[in-house]
Amino acid sequence: MITERILQIIDYKGINRRRFYIETGLSNGFLDKVKDIGVSKLEHILTIYPDINPEWLLTGKGYMTAPKAYSEDESTLHWIEDPGVIYTKRIKKPVPLYDVQTPEGIISLFGASEQEPIDYISVPNLQNCDGAIYVSGDSMYPILKSGDTILFKKMSNIIDNIFWGEMYLVSFSTDDLEEFLMIKWIQKSKKGEDWIKLVSENTQHEPKDIQFKHVKGFALIKTSIRTISTY
């Protein structure tokens, strides 16, 4: 069954089901609730894990990993199609770094058309990040401080996809249409199921409850980078 092969992927990646749901954006407990997985969800899984062989996932035939190999010269890496070889080294795609210091930058980060990145970041052993931004402000201090870099994975904008208590990058607007982009812990709100509570690490910043309908987009914070020296 396809669900059994997905469990093999989880084992192969060395992650647990919870991390799989976070990385793919699928709802928590999805694998326990369905027997037949739609084509769109399979395509999404293959997009998140491009090294998985589509034929194997769909039919169980062939190898789990995509049948490709690579060669390397002094200046570049070349992919070589070879159905008889399973490659053992993956070339990671660098993560784009975006500028969100302007309202336009905030809107475009989760908009239909992405802005051009100002740079790229490569972090070993880090998978499936959609982007990175610089931290501004002290609301998450001391975990994050102004000038740090965070790398994030965008999530489907559905409240059921939230992993409560995790740190997220949240884009939302107020009733007067002012745009905000914040890094916060997301917790359940006492105001009801359609609300979320944004909580800072810095206790000088009060928690804020917002209606989820005002959220334009949110992304799971996967890692942070701190520059110790500017030399």
Image (cartoon, helix red, strand yellow):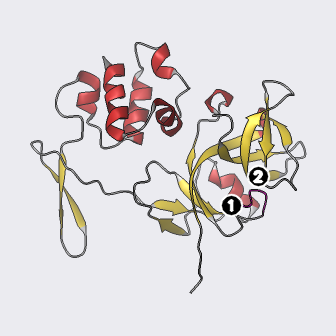
* Upstream in sequence: badge 1 or badge 2: 1
In this view, the residue in front, 161 or 103, is 161
The residue lying at 36 percent from left, 57 percent from top is 92
Which secondary structure is most common in the magenta stretch?
A: loop
Residue 85 vs residue 104: left or right?
A: left
The residue lying at 17 percent from left, 52 percent from top is 69
Which quadrant does the C terminus fall into? bottom right
Residue 171 vs residue 148: left or right?
A: right
In this view, the residue in front, 27 or 111, is 27
What x and y, as percent, mark residue 204?
88, 56
Q: How far is mark 1 from mark 2, CA to CA? A: 9 Å
What residue type is disc 2 on? Glu
What x and y, as percent, mark residue 201?
76, 52
The residue lying at 85 percent from left, 28 percent from top is 190
Mark on residue 201?
2
Question: Could you tell me which secondary element the residue under label 2 belongs to?
Answer: loop
Instruction: In the displayed orientation, state which residue is furthest to the bottom.
Output: 231
What x and y, as percent, mark residue 58?
28, 24
Query: Residue 28, relative to residue 22: is it above or below?
Result: above
The residue lying at 30 percent from left, 43 percent from top is 51
Instruction: In the displayed orientation, state which residue is furthest to the left.
Output: 84
Q: Which residues fall within the magenta stretch? A: 138-144
What x and y, as percent, mark residue 148?
64, 66
Total labels drawn:
2
Is there a contact, CB below 8 Å, between mark 1 and mark 2?
yes
Q: Is residue 139 magenta?
A: yes
Residue position for label 1: 144
Question: Could you tell me which secondary element the residue under label 1 belongs to?
Answer: loop
